[in-house]
Image: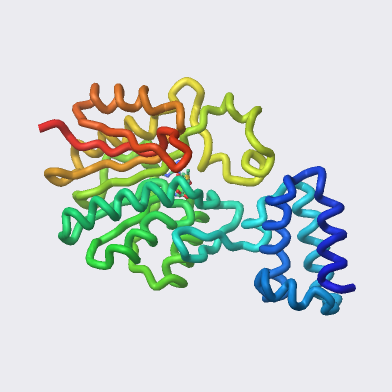
Amino acid sequence: MSLQTLKLAFKEALKTQYENIELNSLLSILFEHVTGWNQLNQVLHKDAPLSQQQMDTLQNALEQLKEGRPIQYITGKAWFLSNEYVVNEQVLIPRPETEELVDWIIEYAQIIDKPLQILDIGTGSGCIPIALQLALPHCSISGLDISEEALTIAKQNAMQLNATVSWLQEDILSTTYLPNKYDIIVSNPPYIPFRENVNMQVQVKQFEPSIALFVTNEDPLIFYRTIARLGKLYLNPNGQLFFELHYDQGKALLALFDEMGYHAELRQDMFGKDRMLRASLKK
Ligand SMILES: C[S@@+](CC[C@H](N)C(=O)[O-])C[C@H]1O[C@@H](n2cnc3c(N)ncnc32)[C@H](O)[C@@H]1O
């Protein structure tokens, strides 16, 4: 069967599940993953016959797409700030808003213009510390996660991308010790209250790790409060906290950081939503 015939059959099979633009993009990524042909080459080779092995792999991927498995988990790859990362279901798929957070930190570090000690808490695939290390090679960067499986993926990504990052396995909610003092502590922590589970896309709630997503309804800001407390002990003078946040937690977080003795400011993502926060201790 030719590439074009199979692609059209897949579009027909998935058309009720995905918007047309999203579907075209998903199929282009999937067919590139299996054939090695980019979008242009897929057009040029549209009449090329696929091997039995390629068709079997694609058929298997089609079943997974029907179940709602994200394409990044099917191909095992995700993009973050122009680099390809290995991902599996033990790590969150890196998001564009996290790229904006990293851009903000890079902007800040370039203004400070000296080697900085940076810690990323809840590192997942390692996308934040790796992207920071690649952009700021003179900084010393560590990534911390509770999940051994996530750290295995983070280490693999660091090796593939030639980034030097130190890794720590720790439960940030129960530790009172960090091995260093830092100029920047960054975190994209779990921040979705469990009650929002019902409104979430199946691709996210069924396939992404719940430990990366959810916090209790009773205390959704627990990671921010804990890290703010640690910041008082482990931030160097003029040290900064950077966070990603749930778009409707901006006001509550400004109040929390003020109460805990920090100046804090919010930054909006490309859609104008409160998505990032920077805080430093009041003098
Ligand atoms: C929202 S994900 C962020 C992943 C990655 N930094 C990113 O931005 O794509 C949150 C991460 O926090 C980790 N995590 C959850 N609870 C934790 C805890 N108590 N201590 C340390 N890490 C934790 C999860 O394993 C997950 O990797």
Image-quadrant location for residue 97:
top left
Quadrant showing the C terminus: top left
Classify 29 as above or below 226: below
- Residue 151 position, x and y percent, is 46, 57
Residue at 23 percent of width and 39 percent of height: 231
Percent of width and height locating residue 165: 34, 63
Give the side of residue 30 with respect to residue 256, left or right. right
Residue 280, picture quadrant: top left
Would you say 77 lies left or right of 32 here? left
**Residue 67 at what x, y percent from top left?**
77, 47
Image point 46% across, 34% down: which residue? 191
Position above or below: 277 against 180: above
Q: How far from the left and from the top, in percent, is residue 15?
A: 81, 48
* Count of marks, rendered view: 0
Q: Quadrant of ligand 1?
A: top left
- Say which of 40 and 117 sits in front: 40
The residue depicted at 52 percent of the width and 39 percent of the height is 213
Depth order, front residue of 229/251: 251
**Quadrant including the N terminus:** bottom right
